Image: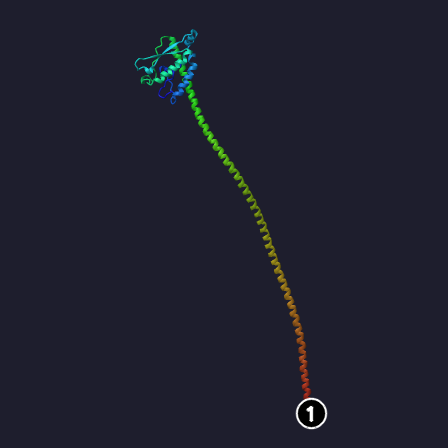
Amino acid sequence: MPEGINRAPLVGGSDDEAEHSQEVIATPSVQVQSSDRLTRQLVRKSSFRTSGSVSRGYASGKSLLISIHDSDDENAPGERRYPVSLSPGSEDETVAATRKRRRSSKVPCPAHLVLGCHLPSLASSAEKEAFAKVAVASSKVMEAFNEYVVVMEDHVVASRNDKEIESIGSKIKRLSKELEVTKREGKKDAEKIEALTEDWRRIHQENEAFTTQVVAQKAKIAALEVERDQDIHRASRIARRDIEQRYREILESLEDRWTSKKKEVSVEIRLQEVTANIDLLNELKDGG
């Protein structure tokens, strides 16, 4: 339905009959072509089911005509009235004539007729009743059309949401692949870290063992140094004892030699004295 015209097209194969209806339905922002096309399709299915007089016309085999006042041509000279047949056989012809007349008519409804155009002059109560039923059916059609528009808008929004969901899904797949690659790389890095950790632990254990060995060697060296010092002290004491013993033996031997020599010297001195005395006595003897 065009924006700014808050009128519903009437059932019966004519869109201009909406301009004569007293039903006002606000459906802004709906395209004209889809609205007219859907309305005509729904009208063709339900237009002749609502009127009792139409049913009676079917029974008598006559075509019932309703004289419709064209409000678009109200101000134009030579006002015309278009008979609208309510018989099933003349439906397509009426719709075609209405379409042709609507395409040729470019004059909008006057401002004082926007909210409700003049009703056509209907002669009998049956025609009025039929027209009223047509107007009610038209309002129902427009209500269904409004529901259809809402459903289509929801479908458009859903399709947009589906595209957004598809885009988000592709992003999620891409991120999932990147996450999988990151997980694999992280797993490889974790394995490398685990291997490096094992190497560090092994080296740390080797260092601890080496440190233990170094400490043991240092303790052993210290013990050996202590034992060496003890051996040196012991050997030095033994050497001193041996030296002292030898010195003592040497002194004793020297003392023995000195004593014997001393005795020899004294004996020699005595011998010399005796020899001197003997010589002196000999001289005295010879001189006397």
- From the viewer's perspective, is residue 219 above or below residue 62? below
Residue 121 in which image quadrant: top left
Instruction: Write down the residue under mark 1.
Output: 286
Out of 3 and 199, give the one closest to the viewer: 3
Q: Where is residue 51 in the image (x, y as percent from the top left)?
A: 41, 11
Residue 108 in which image quadrant: top left
Q: Is residue 15 visible?
A: no
Out of 34 and 92, give the one closest to the viewer: 92
Q: Position of residue 3 (x, y in %)?
A: 36, 21
Furthest-top residue in this view: 60
Q: For the residue labelled by badge 1, is the local secondary structure a helix, a strand or a loop?
A: helix
Residue pictured at 69% horizontal, 89% vertical: 282
Query: Left or right: where does residue 265 sit relative to residue 107?
Result: right
Total labels: the figure holds 1
Q: Is the residue marked by circle 1 packed among few (<14), some (14-19), or many (20+) residues within 10 Å?
A: few
Furthest-bottom residue in this view: 288
Quarter placement of the N terminus = top left
Q: Can residue 286 be seen in this view?
A: yes
Residue pictured at 68% horizontal, 85% vertical: 275
- From the viewer's perspective, is residue 224 above or below residue 68? below
Query: Left or right: where does residue 61 sit relative to residue 238?
Result: left
Q: What residue type is disc 1 on?
A: Asp
Query: Left or right: where does residue 80 sit relative to residue 221?
Result: left
Quarter placement of the C terminus = bottom right
Q: Position of residue 230 (x, y in %)?
A: 62, 60
Residue pictured at 67% horizontal, 73% vertical: 253
Q: Where is residue 201 in the image (x, y as percent from the top left)?
A: 57, 46
